[in-house]
Image (cartoon, coloured by chain):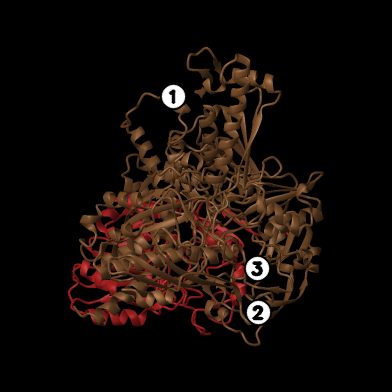
Amino acid sequence: MEISEKTYTNARTVSEAMQVALNSGGNFRFIAGGTDVMVNAFQGNDNTVHLIDINRLEELKGIVQDEHYLRIGALTRLDQLKHVDAVKREFPILIEAAQAVGSPLIRRSATLGGNVLCENRCIYFNQSEWWRMAVGYCLKCSGDVCIATGGKKACFSEFASDTAPALISLKAQLLLHEPGGERLVPLESIYSGDGIKPLLLPRTSLVKEILLPRAQHFKSAFKKLRLRESLEFTSLTVAVSKDMQGAARLVLGGVDPKPVLLELQPGESREDIIKTALKKGRAVDNDMFSRAYRRDMIRVYIHQCLNQIDFQS
Amino acid sequence: MKVLTLTVNGTKHQVLAEEHESLAHVLREKIHLTGTKLGCEQGSCGACTVLADGAVIQSCITPAMRLEGSEITTIEGIADSEKLHPLQARFVEYGAIQCGYCTPGMVMSALAFLKENPRPSRDEIREAISGNLCRCTGYKKIIDAIEAYVKDIAGLTEHKAEDPDLKFKMLGHGRPYLEASRKVKGAAEYADDIQIKNALHCKMLRSIHPHARIRAIHTEAAQRLDGVKAVLTGKDLPISFGVLPISQDETAMAVDKTRYAGEIVAAVAAETEAIAEAACKLIRVEYEALKPFFDMEESLNDIGAHEKIHSHTKFNNNVHKKAELRFGDQQKELAGAAHRLKMDFTFQGINHGFTEPHGATAWWDENGLSIITATQVPHYLHRFLAKVLQTPMNRIRVIKPFVGGGFGGKSDPFPHEMIISCLAKITGRPVKVRFNREEVFLTNHGRHPSRISMELGMSNTGEIAVLDADIVIDGGAYGSFGVVTSYYNGVLLQAPYRISNFGFRTYRVYTNKPQCGAMRGHGAVNSRFAVESMLDVLADKLGMDPCELRLKNFLDSDTFTVGQYRITSNGSAQSLNKVMAQSDWKNRYKKLEYGHGYGVACGFFISGSALPIHWNEYPQSVVHLKVDLDGRVLISSGASDIGQGSDTMLAIIVGEVLGLSMDHVFVLAADTLLTPIDLGSYSSRVTFMAGNAAKMAAEQLRAKIMESLAGHFGIDPAELNFAKEQVFTNDRKVNLSWLEAVELATRRVGALNSSGYYNSPKLGGDFKGAGAGLSPSYTFGALVAEVKVDTSSGQVRVLNMWGAHDCGKALNPLAVEGQLEGSWHMGMGQAISEEMRFENGLLLNANFLNYKIPTSLDTPHIYANIIETGDPEGPFGAKEAGEGALHPSIPAIANAIYDAIGIRITALPIRPEDVLAKLKLKQTEEPV
């Protein structure tokens, strides 16, 4: 047997992490909680050679408030959020979303930064190597056909993050550290909509902080479709937040390769909203719940969420 | 590879680890701390939970390299040497430990959580452990234990004076399992925890085709790989086997053709797991695909020019077995019945979901073959190893270590056991195998997917007049227990209700999917669902309370069923009355708001199969007792404790008869070299059969001692009492300690030992099929479920389950409650969330993420009621408690849904989308 070329680096600083990344010949990945990466590695879905552990990067830790933003360090564990007063006060929906992720054990390891970058999922992809060989490899693992749809053009793996829809509804931005410097981008802008490569970010992008605009007095609602109350990825996530002007951002997860964002103006009819959501959310039969049911539930959850925030239609 | 420094439980370790190796692997394989368990390897079960620098993590998905320099605490670091941590002590005391496989992770999760929140509510505890799956307990006793510990640390526990006689209280006093402390410390060794020196590792290559001819297998490249010691294919082990003598249709690996995707085609033994795995990838198999059969209807029909799954089947179809029995003319009776109802039901297959994956190690030495393996049935494995390896039984030893749950899923002899035994012979080295969770699912042997069409006729006054069932069960690729399953689907419907006209026909068909077999409640669970649902419909039709309807129809005690089952003790009515009262049935049923409902159902099951699988006159259970000068009674029994507590049951019986505490009792079990024959842990037979054998052995030992002492003292043997480790006459003229009594008796008889055995009485009618479902005793029970249905999503939430089960006599009430709670929890899983979903023969959800075992948050309040009817032939009146209780739980939930929203459930699992679809249909049919 050949000696494995794999490496694991515990980076101490952002610049060290970047340096290792740039020297790795491209086959690398930053790893934080690892709850996603390690499972994908176990299944043979992630064969990254160089793992760069960022858990020790102080620059990515902590939660601070400035005049305009609540700045949440990317390494904040999902479970920590419920203890943070500023989050409790201004963004309770984020706690609800974070608590909906996985299980209490997962939430103690998984980070907020990692969750928004969570790999897309599909019941035909998140399988062992043997299984994928038996089914005949799908588009997302170098095959030439989508098993879920039979199509050859597009992969419809589901966007799986629960916190991202909530964050997008709250107009979150990401502070990215990249070799060229830092930049601030709206969270929704990093998702491609392509199930094979769902992120538009270069691999060298490191999420440093998640920024939430303060003093917006959001009124929010959150729903996640799952069969059990724990240990579940989403089959449909609906998050909506209404600002002081009565406009709202409605975000769906789990029904498209990217989060589906609808900007709602006060007075917009429910039927129009639902129609648009159903049109934009390209759900396919790649989940334990059927496509038809998930689409039914888009309607139900949008109604329930909009009622909950008193959205005037 | 890199040197990794970790401090584990206070000890510094430097180990050579792979760069991406998981912490769990390092802890288990390199530091040999095997209390950290692997259940899923994907962060979906929590068995591997440990603390790293005080933070709780799942070690199976944590890279070890991350923790360079960290302090790790595993379960082995929780107890203070011999003294349990107080939380561990509560786990033991409260019976929170059954198979013990989830226990270490559960304790670690709870401890981490309690550090954050030392005064949690019960609901917060439920939430805190909802990432840790337990398949045995239904979480109830785990939550109770944590709650008790929380009270302890808050100083709220009232300390009672310890009862000095407690240790002598045997029958009817709840006691923790003998091995509970070992399990809670993570010290109990399961198959994969046992390291045999110099062992090779085995990995399997599995078919990617559901049905294909194997043209050629090219193993040369694999064989050439450094570190590979042997490669086997089907032709190396061509002798067929199968747990039932009548369906020996399986081989260790596919020979000539493969019958399901996942079937083993080749196996490799190599120096490391990684090499074995790499070698499997180098094996090239040439397949010629055949038309696969996935649908059971299709398998019933003539298949034309296509190739059958098995050539031995009678007709040009894939029917494995047709079982049919009729008592009377059902159709005639139905035609004349006042009320006649026909309904169709469909059931998906489910898997046992035990938390410990299969694992085994085999080796050969001067004594022949030894194998340590996670099995419920050492005896049947013993037989089939002899057959397949062509080795006499006296050269084979099967050893059962601690087993992390079985539920029927470890009750067949398995291909991997044959394969490693053969590899060990060829290589001259021990060979070890451990399955991952996907392989466990592919091995399956779970509950058969079924389609049941049932007709019931009833009089105007609510007497059941006739029952006719037409059943098809999907056996998958091989036979397993399927012939028995076929009969049980029908025959176990002839009780608990009086039915004088009864018939059924079951077809078991082969399909190209992993085989089905026996699972808790074997055979009767789905057909019981059909009957209990239909009684609910008929009660509604007649305007009768469904409990009243059932009470009216129950069989009496000491009677016979239409198929000549001898019913002795019968606690049906007590069970039902108990749960009616406890659930406040009369005031709640049909009286709750829309979306909220109550439902009831009853159950019936065997307490041990009266007929052995291999027909012979040998006893079904033997127990030997050996006493030596240390005064300790060694109980030697072949019974397999798989977490249900049978070792403790044996000790209780022997302790009771001889007046001993556990200090003087030692159980040696399930090692075919050292222990006598016992057929194994299946058909709910162990308490009844091994228990009776133990009782007989203990009584004989007592008689021997009495006789010797009577001779010595010149008294009547009957004057002697055995209690509190003393042997004495009432007048205390003879007043010996147990040790003195043993010494005196041994001096007189020379050697002191005894044996007991059990064989079922001759039972049953004189007709073909009369043997199916015969049992020396039967059990009965009832359950009321309360549900809420979210009518916007169709999701069902079970709020409460009040259950009662007639176990004759609870020898160990703590263990019996645990069995009942676990059964109901497992039934709830089949009802609302579990199914094995296939697509083109490929199992879509072979993991704990998408095979949805209810978590602690999904599990309702469970109220367990033990009903004691004192069985005339059971040991001290006891009969089974491990399987029968499951039956009523599923239909009770379905009937509660009807009460809640008026939707009749005819398919399992109860998928929210189906409920929603039915609700919509109802709304269009009956506009509000």
Q: Nearer the viewer, residue B86 or B375?
A: B375
Q: Quarter holding the C terminus of chain B?
A: bottom left
The amino acid pointed to by label 1 is: Asp
Of marks 1 and 2, which one's residue comes earlier in the chain? 1
* Badge number at residue B308: 2
Residue A27 position, x and y percent, is 60, 66
Residue B594 position, x and y percent, is 22, 66
Question: What is the display colour for chain A?
Answer: red
The amino acid pointed to by label 3 is: Glu
| Quadrant position of residue A212 | bottom left
Which SS class for mark 3?
Answer: loop
Mark 3 Cα shell of 10 Å, populated few (<14), some (14-19), many (≥20): many
Q: Nearer the viewer, residue B408 or B106?
A: B408
Q: How many angstroms separate mark 3 from mark 1 (CA)? A: 55 Å
Q: Same subunit under labels 2 and 3?
A: yes
Classify residue B485 as left or right of residue B746: left
* Badge number at residue B701: none
Q: How many angstroms separate mark 2 from mark 3 (CA)? A: 17 Å
